[in-house]
Amino acid sequence: MTIFHTSRRHTLSALALALAMPLSTLATTPEPLPQPESGRVERLANVPSKEVDARHVDVWLPQNFDALKAAGQRFNVLYMHDGQMLYDARTTWNKQAWHVDRTLSRLMADGRLPPTLVVGVWNNGKYRHSEYFPQKYLAHMRPEARELLIRKGLQNKPQSDAYLRFLVNELKPLIDARYPTHTGPEHTAVMGSSMGGLISVYAMNEYPQIFGRAAGLSTHWIGGFEPNSHMPLAAYVYLRDHLADPATHRLYQDHGTTELDALYAPFQVFVNQIVRDRGYTDQGPAANFMTRVFEGTGHNEKAWADRLEIPLLFMWGAR
């Protein structure tokens, strides 16, 4: 039985492995402060926590932040995982970035999004998978599959619930005290890609009173590097019972069709049905769910940057 492969054979290409593995080692590599094209990044260095290891948090502020703050403006807040990869390709391991500042600056300048700041939370190196794999999925796995995942995939240390407590009970109060934010769930979103997509959806479901919007790009429903039934089935059961109220929340999902994303389609289709069965709709002006497939795109920051506008406008754009 194989539920967590790191080999290069079979369905995982060498490129997909190169994309997936370095993300799990980034937090141990010293990085200079990102220099965005627009606005500025303030680093909250080695933010301490009673829940998880300390890590950097890179907060992006838009170009006109100071003037807006002086005028009494409050800001929406987008919490993003893998914070090393968000702003400046010159500082990332693969020389790619989401260029979140570029997309947000354009959409805000065009009046299509309200003033927004970004909280980029660094991943935790070898514990990235441990912090991003939704912990409550484990109860829905067969014992042998669960034990193997915990040992090989989660470093014998499932931490996603502790990571979410860090975000909600420690980091968010810090951000709300330091910056003029809107604090309600309709103004607070969480977003990530791959494993970051998993933890984003989990965060909204576990803390619906905090996060009113969640977006998972190339959400890694398979949990490992090869198709399997154990982790997706656990996710399905959890989602069936714990999806946030569609009356007050919005959920975005997508994937490409190449590299690691080539594995995702059948799993995402079933997730989509669970979401619809919960009462979410992707039809009409009241849509609170969006799911997209991007043909010919892969599992990398360039692909996510190219389509970032879509989830941002879905979560907060004018209706």
Image (tube, grey):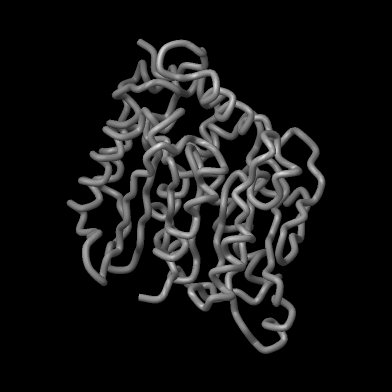
| Residue at 48 percent of width and 60 percent of height | 309
| One can see residue 156 in this view | no
- Vertical order, 142 against 105 (above or below): above
Q: Residue furthest front?
A: 296
| Residue at 69 percent of width and 67 percent of height | 61
| Residue at 66 percent of width and 45 percent of height | 122
Q: Quadrant of residue 212?
A: bottom left
| One can see residue 38 in this view | yes
| Residue at 27 percent of width and 33 percent of height | 266
Q: Position of residue 151 (x, y in %)?
A: 51, 19
The mark total stands at: 0
- Vertical order, 153 against 243 (above or below): above
Q: Quadrant of the N terminus?
A: top left
Q: Nearer the viewer, residue 220 or 300?
A: 300
Q: Nearer the viewer, residue 311 or 138?
A: 311
Q: Position of residue 304 (x, y in %)?
A: 51, 46
- 108 left or right, relative to 264: right
Q: Position of residue 117 (x, y in %)?
A: 62, 67
- 181 left or right, relative to 142: right
Q: Nearer the viewer, residue 223 or 252?
A: 252
Q: Residue furthest left?
A: 277
Q: Position of residue 89 (x, y in %)?
A: 70, 45
Q: Quadrant of the C terminus?
A: bottom left
Q: Nearer the viewer, residue 12 or 128?
A: 12
